Structures are given as structure tokens and as C-alpha cells.
Amino acid sequence: MNKLGNKLGVVVGIIFFIVGLLTLPDYGINWDTINHLPRGQAYLHYYLTGENDYSNLDPFTKYHQDESTLAISPDSTLTNRRSLYQNDSVPYSWYMEYDGGGHPPASDIISSFFNYILYQKLGIINDIDSYRVYGVLLASALVSLLYYWVKGKTNALSALVASFSLALYPLFFAESHFNTEKDIPETVFWSFLLYCVWKGIIKKNPKLILLSGVFLGLALGTKFNVLFIVFVIVPWILFVLAKNNYGSSVKQLVKRIKTHKALLLSAMIAPILGIIIFVALWPYLWQDPIGALTGVVGFYKTIGTTTNFDIRYLGWGGMNTYPIQWIFYTTPIVILVLSGVGFVVSIVRLMRTHDNFYLLVLLWLMVPILRVSLPGSNIYGGVRQIMEYVPALAILAGVGAHYMVSTIGRKWKVSSTAVSLVVVLAFVPLVFTMWRIHPNQNVYFNPLIGGLEGAKKEDIPSWGNSFGAAYRQGVAWINENAESDAHVVYAHELIPNIPTIWWRQDLVVWNVYRSGFLQSGEYAITLTYDGTKSRSYYDAYLELFVEPSFTVDVDGVSILKVWHNTPENQKYSLTEKTEKVTYSKDKSSVVFDLGITESLKELQYQFDSSDCVDTTSAYVEVSVDGTAWTRLPGVLPSDWLIPFEEFGPQPNGTLMRHPFAGTIARYIRVNISPTDSCLWSPTSAEVTYYENIPSTLREDLTNLF
């Protein structure tokens, strides 16, 4: 029976892998992919060939990869299987000079190796998805590990619940498909490291301790999060030593050391082994290890600390409650209840039985969360950056299930089989929810806050942000519906956010075609989430004035939109009027007065370009009363608010044009640097505005910025 139970754990992992593999074509790439995969390919190419660049490869051939299939598109014009991310502009030699400003590259290299085998050599999985098999495989291994681990402590039901809780945790499931260079690998390596330490010490197995060094190296080579595992392992080891009366006398301690020499030796070798693997998988370090590591530490310090907190989440003593609130509202209720019970049960059993397993799991859960909750620490975009807590939460769910089945059965004389069946069936609604919102599980919020719609109403930071996963759905719609040779732009994002090979080959994908109110007919795509509506002129214009042609919705909230920017798709039929305006100047700005408060469309003003210097920067503010000012997004001339046709970078010649997304204002202030800039000398000015706008639109415009 024990062997059968262990095999069931393997089966659960295999099922997760198959489901993950088959659903890979439903997910876009992570925003950070462009920062990771070219680096992974550059280093891998050097390891395999010793070459500093890709001059020994055939040039990349542009083609269309059908975004809906795992296989290589049968109708592609592919002549060689060189990866899109084997980029000539950033070869190994480039990274040896400029790498070091971000996360380590171990998982970049390993995922690139999966691409090398599955795509470049075997040709069985397409260029993009072949990288992500790595993440799905790792996640599947962790699902099996949790089953095996929990079963060894309790029983098969608890093990199944733990595995289900991990596999069906929305964040974990979704990110295992496309977050394959950072958070998923780090979570898996962290978990296997803890298991090897736990099992190695409990069973006094030096080989497992040495194996923990391998996982340490892989985790350290992925993210520095693993350094915080010391706050899990050290207290746990001290607890084990205290429980077993190690060192109660010098004589006893010496005797223990002699008895476990191999274990102690492996414990000393394991960290060294981890460091060797870490360094071996990062060639950039070979040149100047100290200098390179200093830069990486600075990077982590920058992203991990801040003083700009949302005051709504500042708790007692300056604690940041955002992480724990996010976890509370994004954990499915069945897992939340079971893990809550498991948390209490683990504390009670730790106090009563001093079982070190419960201490390990409790520390495992709390350390990642606490490190981003302490005063002065920071986390953004939800909790994907500390996903190490998820397996611990899943284990606690298994512990909670075991307690509930045994307690209910004993106290109420109910068959344990019946209770077990109820516990397992409690996951069925979650399965349907995961299916309903597929493939957008990483924007899931539970019913305690009213789903994603409730999170939006509560204005929880980063609600709806899929970090690139939803793009693929929008790409599929545009490929199917756009006319030949259509222009495609991103509302705000960068072109590498979507692999260029996913676009139909006749489409012209270039952000210079953002036309705003000129309505040139471009297709605009963007992820829509917390704050995107007001981040730029173009975002605001699309949201307020153009009907979306396609949306991806979760709980009634759009997380991706596609607009076809044509007059036919305007939301409102608005009349316009242009008026000459007065202006005044001070030392660093020009203020234009329309004379009335209206919904602004465009400011145009001529200026004297003689005896002045070019503008280095300018930004625009608006006001209703001339006292309270609101700054609009964008800094000229670097931000091209409307790049298309005659607009382009502003100012242009002796003319300055600035579009507005219907902003309600009377006064416009252009702040200029340097103070002797040509922009500071207007000769005439006029403003175009919308007349008689609907009350619903006026309300949206008033609250826009």
C-alpha cells in the first residue's frame, strides 16, 4: 500500500505536467522574458561552442508561428531553427561587459537548454513554448514532492490535499506556464533544498545534505531570495539540537560529532558546492566576482526597500500589511480554510509534541512573508516575488485536512471515508473556477473581496495585472480579424512584450503608428489593470473615446483590450470648437487661459525660435481654478504623445502641439527647461475643446488624473 501511495504522488505530478504542457499555448510571455532568454542563450551558446557570438549560426529567419499551437507552425516559412532569442545584438561578449544589474542567469540558461533540445535539435515544440517546458516540469516535480513528503508525515488523503492545494493554487498554476526564469524555479529549488536538509538530518543521510548544496546553487543562481532560507534552517536546526540534547556537555558533543562525521562534513561541503554551481553558471562573475556581486546586491536593495508605501497598508510599527492582505484575498477559500486549520494545528502539535516538521513548515510559510512586511521593506505586483510561501501553505492545508477528517470522524461518529470525500469534493468548485478564468488564473481574487471586480473597487494595487500572460489572447484576435497590412501598436508597452513571430507576417507592428485623435485606424493592444487608464495620453484616449473591439474579461473586469482606432469606433459623437487663448509667462513656464472650463482636445502654439536654445524637457499641468494643478503624464520631447504623421516629437519647428484626452480644465501650464528655451516665447496660441460632453464622460474625465 505504501508503494501504491507513493506511485499516486508520481501520477499527480504527471497529470499536472500533462495539463501544463497542453495549456502552454494559452499563455503569453512574462514581461521580463526579453531580459532573461537572450542572456540564457548567449551563455548557453558559449558553453556549447566556446563562441563569443552567433557568427557560426545561420541568420534568423522571420516567420509566423501560429500562437495557438504547441508544435511548430506547419505553414511557417521556417528554413532553420534558430531561436528568436539568439540575438546578434546581445551575444556572450556583450553580457560579459554589461551583465550584473539584475537576477542571476541559472534558470535563463537551463530554460534555454530546453529550447536547444526541444526546438533547435528535435523540432517537436515551437521556439517560445519550448523554453517554458522547464517551468512546467519543475512545478510538476514539486507537486509530486509535496505528496511524498506529506504522506510520510500523515496519510494519503493529506498528501493529496497538499498536492491539490499547490497544483490548484491560481498563482502557482498560471505562473508555472510563463514565469520560468525566476519565481517558479526559485520556489521549486527552495522547496527541494528544505526537503533535503530536513530528510538528510532526520535520517542522518550525508548524500541528501550534499544534494541540498546542488539545490542551493540552483536557487542562488536564479534569485537571491534563497539567502533568507537561513532564517528557516538555522532556527530549525537549533531546535532539533536542543530537542535531542546535543551539546549538553562537551564530552557528549564531541561524541556526537565523532558519530556523525560524514553528516557534518557534508553540511560543510554543501554550501561550498552551492557557491561553485552559482559561480559556474554566471560567467560574468568570473572577471570580477566582488564587483559583480556588489552590483547585484545593490539591485536587490533597490527593488526590496522603499519608503513610498500606500498608507492604507501601513500597520502597527510601520509593518507593511499589503503582502498578507494580498495572500488572504487571492488564496482560494477551500485552501484558506484548510491551511488556517493546519496553521493552528501545527502550532499546537509543535508545543505539545515538539515535532520539528511543524516548526519547519511554519518558518517556511512565515519567513518569506515577514521579510517583505517588515518596516522599510517593499514588494510590488502582488506576491509572485515571494512565491516560496505557496508550498508551505499547501502542506498546512494537508495538515488541516488530516485533522478535520480525524476529529470530525471521532467526535461526531462520522465515517472518515465520508469526511475525506467531502474534503476532496470541496476542491471541485475551485477546479471549475480555474477552468472558467483560464488562462488568467494569476489575476484571481477570492469571493471574500468579491473576485477581481471587488479588488478593483477596493483599488488593491496591481489588481488585474497578468504580467504578460493575457497578451496571447489579444494576438490571436488581431491575427484573425485585422485586415491585410494593418498597423498594430501597443498602447504603452514595449514591442518585445510579445514575440514578434506570433504576429501575422503582413501586419506592421510598430508603436510609431499610435495616432490618438487622428484616428488612423491602427489596432492598439494593452493589458488593462490598476493605473493603466491614466498612465499616458494614448491610454486615456483609447479608454475614454474608443469602443474596444476585443476584451479579455475576468469577473466582469477587462484585463486586456484591443481597440481599432477608427472614427466608426468612437464612443461619442462630439462637437469641437477652437478658440484663441491668452497666455502669460513667468521664469520657467507659460500659462494659457481658455477663459472657460471645457473638455480639452489639443493645444497649439507658435513660438519665436530666434535667440533661444532647444528645449531639453517640458511637461504640462492643467487646472480648473488656476490654483490647484494636476500634472499630466509625459515629458517632452522624449515622450511622443502622438508619434503618427505630423505630430511626432514635440516641439516641431516653431510649433508646439499637445493633445489632451478630454481633460476638464481652463488653464494649461507648460513647464519648460531650460528657462531660455524657445518654448518660453509663444507668439500665438489656440485650444480645441469638446462641447456639450455627456455627463457620464464628464465624470470619468474629472477623475482621470
Image (spheres, grey):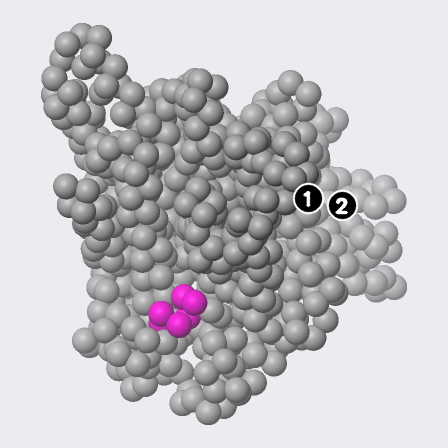
The residue that label 1 is drawn on is 620
Residue furthest to the top? 412
Mark 2 falls on what kind of element? strand
Tell me the kind of residue under disc 2. Answer: Asn
Q: Nearer the viewer, residue 237 or 577?
A: 237
Q: Contact, CB < 8 Å: mark 2 with mark 1? A: yes
| Residue 111 belongs to magenta span | yes
The residue range painted magenta reads: 110-115
Q: Vertically, is 86 above or below 195?
A: below
The residue that label 2 is drawn on is 671
Q: Is residue 243 left or right of residue 416?
A: right
Q: Mark 2 or mark 1, which has the lower sequence index?
A: 1
Tell me the kind of residue under disc 1. Answer: Val
Give the percent coordinates (x, y) of residue 124.
23, 73
Q: Is residue 473 left or right of residue 370?
A: left
Q: Nearer the viewer, residue 181 or 487?
A: 181
Could you tell me which quadrant the C terminus lies in?
top right
